[in-house]
Amino acid sequence: VTSIKFGNKIGMHKNEIETPVLMVDLDTMESNLKKMAEFFKTVPANLRPHTKTHKTPSLAHKQIEYGAVGICCGTLDEAAVMISAGIRDVLVTREIVSPEQLDRVIGLSRHSDIIIIVDDHEVVERFALAAESNGVKVRTMIDVRCRLDRSGVLPGDPSLLIARKIHNSKGLKFAGIAGYEGSMHGWKPERREASCKEALSSLIETKELIERDGIEVPIVSAGATSTYRTAGSFPGITEVQAGTYITMDDEYYGFFPEFNIALSVLTTVISRPSSTVVTTDAGSKKLTTDEGLPVPKDSPWLKLKAVNEEHGVLELMELERKIVVGDKIEIIPSHGCTTFNLYDHVYGMRDDHLEIIWKIAARGC
Ligand SMILES: Cc1ncc(COP(=O)(O)O)c(C=O)c1O
């Protein structure tokens, strides 16, 4: 993309850009990618980043350039976009259950090494038959319920039973186990690490149980940005599913000094209705609040108070600061993943100039 509907063009300074737009600071993002890549060179586990964070094929390709072995996707739709963009090794981390979606998996498996996860015997039986009758072998992992009560088969024997079923089927190829233990935001580091290790232990015990049954477990996948060090260095874990590290967001800010926030929404002041109120053009249709209110960047004198649909209402706490209609204000999303999903494009900025525009092609998927 070289320009978009606003007429924004490559090379513009951020003060010239029509807003609201989603931006990444390229130096910061590249530093995050490099730091993560450096860590994974020191441990046996590999990085398989979760691209639900940015939903942007160009960024997924970048993560692979920085050493990732493949990617994770949150949905089949997201995976279809990434596969169409040329990415082969794609793990879909949410269960697929309908026959229609399975048809799509069968089609996609002819163009990629897609991996699906399952936690239900009946689904495994149906999928195995459908894949076999279509002459494909779909890589299939078990979603093992480690800590989060949201999906997955219990560790131990229940996982072994389903592993046998996948292994013995002609249409499915047993690819391993996945046990997302949850990000545990806001927890004290010691508690988070202990809880992560407990979850990973049950995952590894399950892997060993399956292996003792004579079934190879090629992939053992777990982890998030908040637990990448613990999961990445835990014996037996082969892949880590960190997502947010690439751009970070306010919710994750301060977790690790090695990653900095690259993501922001550029807004314009559209009204100064009173001396303490600054209103911008980015409301709830441009900034999500599922993880709290976003935060103005480098401006402790400003506080976002409310987001209406198309208005962001900020409080000016230092009245001597001069802010006038037309000024630009950068806002750091509280939750990057849900914010990306609101935009068609993300602007790559270097030294405050627009260097590249990427399409968020899986936005809404
Ligand atoms: C299945 C799965 N894997 C990994 C992650 C990790 O994401 P992040 O690194 O953004 O915390 C998530 C977060 O929601 C997830 O649902």
Image: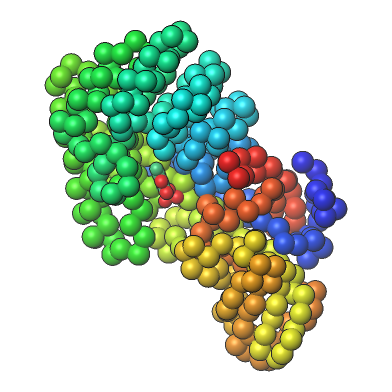
Quarter assignment of residue 333: bottom right
Instruction: Give residue 206's position: percent from left, percent from top.
Output: 19, 32
- Tell me: 160 left or right of 187: left
Instruction: Give residue 136's position: percent from left, percent from top.
Output: 45, 12
In this view of the protein, can residue 191 be seen by the observer?
A: yes
Query: How many numbered marks does the figure carry?
Result: 0
Task: Pick whichever, 322 or 186, lies toward us.
Answer: 186
- Residue that appears at 66% across and 67% down: 309
- Tell me: 290 left or right of 191: right
Colour mapping used in the image: rainbow
Against 199, residue 174 (above or below) is above
- Residue that appears at 37% across and 20% down: 126
Point out the residue furthest to the right here.
7
- Which image quarter holds the N terminus? top right
Instruction: Give residue 35's position: percent from left, percent from top.
Output: 46, 47
- Tell me: 22 left or right of 60: right
- Residue that appears at 81% across and 47% down: 3
In this view of the protein, can residue 175 be seen by the observer?
A: no
- Which image quarter holds the C terminus? top right
Quarter assignment of residue 190: bottom left
